[in-house]
């Protein structure tokens, strides 16, 4: 309606897709648990950033999303917070192996930043996060994955190495995030991304974030997302 349109315009949010959930104004509008609200407060986040205002209700409703917003706009929490809810909503899966949420990022530095942010929100819930990227011993990583985790944050190359070593399977993965998709393509990870996506069940929820949308990334998004909603914030895209 007109009020929603005006609110979105004010935040420089543009959306396309079917039946787009209305943007939220406060974290309180998300229905988060007291524990998660506590972790958000502890981070010093008082209110959601524009991409969070529109992405959180979309992702929490289970929809696939293409999120396009510049660096520093708060995309990490936009996919990490709903991931915690997604994992807490799972029926008892303790006997099964492998991560429920998988996040791929282009570089070890970015993956490490996401790992740190994910851990802050995951830890109070007893959710285990594993980091899978270069610069750490493969044996240590192998052991950590074998011990089990609910979330993996990875660079594509190292994740494939770990899958080949049978450190993990993605049989129970239902939430996949491709962060900085354009940079992953620039770094030549398209084949690795396709291989990873091909090993995850098709009824997963898929989130793709990017600062820009080159044609190659657009093509991948069309292939691997289901009825996505596209959210663009600001002058990018
Ligand atoms: P992006 O992935 O879009 O580049 P980040 O997720 O790395 O952005 O967030 C950029 C910075 O903003 C980080 O320091 C993060 O802690 C902070 N941040 C994220 N969400 C909020 C919020 N709602 N309120 C205040 N700061 C936030
Ligand atoms: Mg980011």
Image (spheres, rainbow, N blue to C red):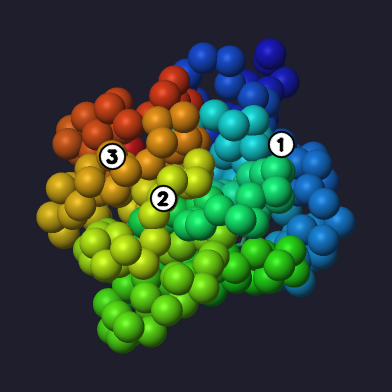
Q: Earlier in the sequence, mark 3 or mark 2?
A: 2
- Reading the image, the residue beneath label 2 is 170
Image: 97 above or below 41: above
- Reading the image, the residue beneath label 3 is 198
Q: CA distance from mark 3 to mark 1?
A: 33 Å
Image: 201 above or below 146: above
Residue 61, by quadrant, is: top right
Q: In the picture provided, is 49 more to the left or to the right than 46?
A: left
Residue 51, by quadrant, is: top right
Q: CA distance from mark 1 to mark 2?
A: 32 Å
Q: Are marks 3 and 1 in contact (CB under 8 Å)?
A: no
Q: In the picture provided, is 173 more to the left or to the right than 127?
A: left
Instruction: Give the total number of marks visible in the rendering.
Output: 3
The quadrant of the rendering that contains the N terminus is top right
Image: 195 above or below 45: above
Q: Nearer the viewer, mark 3 or mark 1?
A: 3
Is residue 135 visible in this depiction of the protein? yes
What label sits on residue 24 in the rendered view? 1
Disc 2 crowd rating (10 Å Cα; few below 14, some 14-19, many 20+) is some
Q: Are marks 1 and 2 in contact (CB under 8 Å)?
A: no
Position in image of residue 162 (x %, y %): 30, 66
Position in image of residue 160 (x %, y %): 25, 60
Q: CA distance from mark 3 to mark 2?
A: 10 Å
Residue at the extreme right = 34
Position in image of residue 16 (x %, y %): 46, 21
Q: In the picture provided, is 212 more to the left or to the right than 76?
A: left
The quadrant of the rendering that contains the C terminus is top left
Badge 1 residue CB within 8 Å of ligand 1: no
Q: In the picture provided, is 197 more to the left or to the right than 54?
A: left
Image: 22 above or below 211: above
For the point 18% across and 33% down, the residue is 215
For the point 56% across and 59% down, the residue is 150
């Amino acid at each position: 309606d007109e009020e929603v349109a005006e609110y979105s315009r004010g935040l420089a949010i543009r959306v396309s897709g079917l039946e787009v959930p209305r943007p939220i104004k406060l974290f309180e509008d998300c229905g988060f648990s007291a524990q998660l609200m506590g972790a958000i407060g502890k981070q010093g986040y008082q209110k959601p950033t524009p991409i969070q205002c529109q992405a959180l209700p979309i992702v929490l409703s289970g929809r696939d999303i293409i999120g396009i917003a510049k660096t520093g706009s708060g995309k990490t929490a936009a996919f990490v917070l709903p991931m915690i809810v997604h994992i807490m909503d799972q029926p008892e899966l303790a006997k099964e192996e492998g991560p429920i949420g998988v996040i791929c990022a282009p570089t070890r530095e970015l993956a490490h930043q996401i790992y740190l942010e994910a851990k802050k929100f995951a830890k109070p819930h007893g959710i285990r996060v594993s980091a899978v990227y270069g610069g750490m011993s493969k044996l240590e990583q192998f052991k950590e994955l074998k011990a089990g985790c609910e979330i993996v944050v990875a660079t594509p190359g190292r994740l494939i190495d770990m899958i080949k070593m049978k450190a993990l399977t993605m049989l129970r993965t239902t939430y996949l995030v491709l962060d900085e998709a354009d940079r992953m393509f620039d770094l030549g990870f398209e084949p690795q991304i396709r291989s990873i996506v091909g090993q995850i069940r098709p009824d997963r929820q898929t989130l793709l974030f990017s600062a820009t949308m080159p044609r190659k990334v657009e093509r991948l998004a069309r292939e691997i997302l289901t009825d996505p909603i596209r959210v663009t914030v600001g002058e990018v895209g």
